[in-house]
Image (spheres, rainbow, N blue to C red):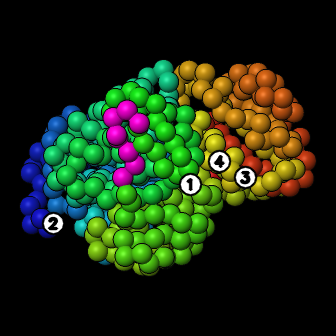
Amino acid sequence: MAGNSDPLSPRAKLAVTAGKAVAAASRAAGRGSGSVIGGRVALKLDPDLLARLAQNLDVTLVSATNGKTTTTRLIAEALRAAGPVVSNALGANMPAGITSALAGSSDARYGVIEVDEKYLAGVARDTAPKCIALLNLSRDQLDRAAETRMLAENWREGLAGSKAVVVANCDDPLVVWAASSSPNVIWVAAGQMWKDDAWSCPSCGGVMQRPGDDWYCGECGFRRPTPSWALSGDHVLDPHGSAWPIHLQLPGRANKANAASSAAVAAVFGVPPQVALERMYQVQAVAGRYDVVQFQGRDLRLLLAKNPAGWLETFSLIDPPPAPVILSVNARSADGTDTSWLWDVDYTRLTGHPICVVGDRRLDLAVRLEVADQHFQVYENLDQAVAACPPGRIEVIANYTAFQDLRRRVGN
């Protein structure tokens, strides 16, 4: 690490000050955190600001379609055992938001940065990371995101020859293809529940064979690498074969997988698995996700699911029937305006749950549930849906902007 002996130039200091002022004005006007607009202004004044802010940090980048915000939080908690950490904890994961986050701390030793999949290569060039964590790739925001194989190719080209240690999920063929261009990869067996975007070989286009948890291409020989870290039930197996118990307050198999990858990243920085996993227990919720809130005298658990892979994982952790479920889907710019992905979600997994449907695109979702032969009711808003739910904790599952709407409504 370079240390803090290299101060920012006058131009960079001006850019940081201006960015913070604009962000504060945005917050005062009630337009959100201001991190994105503040970062845009700062980068306009100093286009190299992100690189300047990162030069004194040991940086970890975290990218994936699902789980990157939570994994970023878990890694940040683990690395605080070794020193101060700066992180974009609220999920502003494009260059402007990342710049704002790094500008907010002058004494950090580590930077743990969530990066949107499309911006990973560029942010890696600017920040010279010591470690890059790659978790998964699947379809998302179909109207504007690159096809998953194209994203994997972009990652592969951007990471070729990188000096970073790449911690990558060996159970996702697209991630393996992307990471294989890097000279220093640590493979983690973190699992892959959603496989529908990885049936063709990213190397040659052949059909992937998937016996059990293994996978390989029978045509070109591209195959699952041998992991050095693995998720095994409620334990993380380290490269020495030791099993470390995972004790999380966050629910579900996916978060245990996130913890396994996070432990592997922490080890790169010298934080032992036992210490890293103990610190991860402190995380109760991530940007409102998994929070249980009181609303209209009822307990609501708030769950975010943005795409088919995310919905599949979320269905696996909700309370069993007859727990009531509220589903909310929007299709605004930040969500992607194409809702055809709803047809890729297996809503038969909700059989037996009383279902209430809200959100901007509630009628799109209603048609999908009708075809899936689910029993549901459509409501204008959250208040009506909660009032109609039978007794029990209510599981509220929403995509990105719908989730933000719900958090504002319940005061979270």
Which mark lies nearer to you, 2 or 4?
Answer: 4
Mark 3 and mark 4: span between their CA atoms?
7 Å
Can you give x and y, in whole percent of width and height, for residue 344 in the image?
63, 29
Residue depicted at x 46% and y 45%: 215
Dot 4 falls on a residue whose secondary structure is helix
Which label's residue is closer to the chain start, 4 or 1? 1
Can you give x and y, in whole percent of width and height, for residue 302 in the image?
67, 50
How dense is the environment of label 4, judged by Cα within 10 Å: few (below 14), some, or many (20 and up)? some
Q: Which residues, given as a range, are shown in magenta? A: 218-225
Was residue 222 drawn as part of the magenta stretch in this picture?
yes
Q: Amino acid at mark 4?
A: Thr
Q: Which mark is residue 1?
A: 2
Mark 4 and mark 1: span between their CA atoms?
9 Å
Mark 3 and mark 2: span between their CA atoms?
43 Å
Depth order, front residue of 87/130: 130
Is there a contact, CB below 8 Å, between mark 2 and mark 1? no
Q: Quadrant of the N terminus?
A: bottom left
Q: Amino acid at mark 3?
A: Ile
Quick check: 166 above or below 2? above
Dot 2 falls on a residue whose secondary structure is loop
Is there a contact, CB below 8 Å, between mark 3 and mark 4? yes
Residue extending farthest front: 218
Which label's residue is closer to the chain start, 2 or 4? 2
Quick check: 10 above or below 250? above
Q: Amino acid at mark 1?
A: Ala
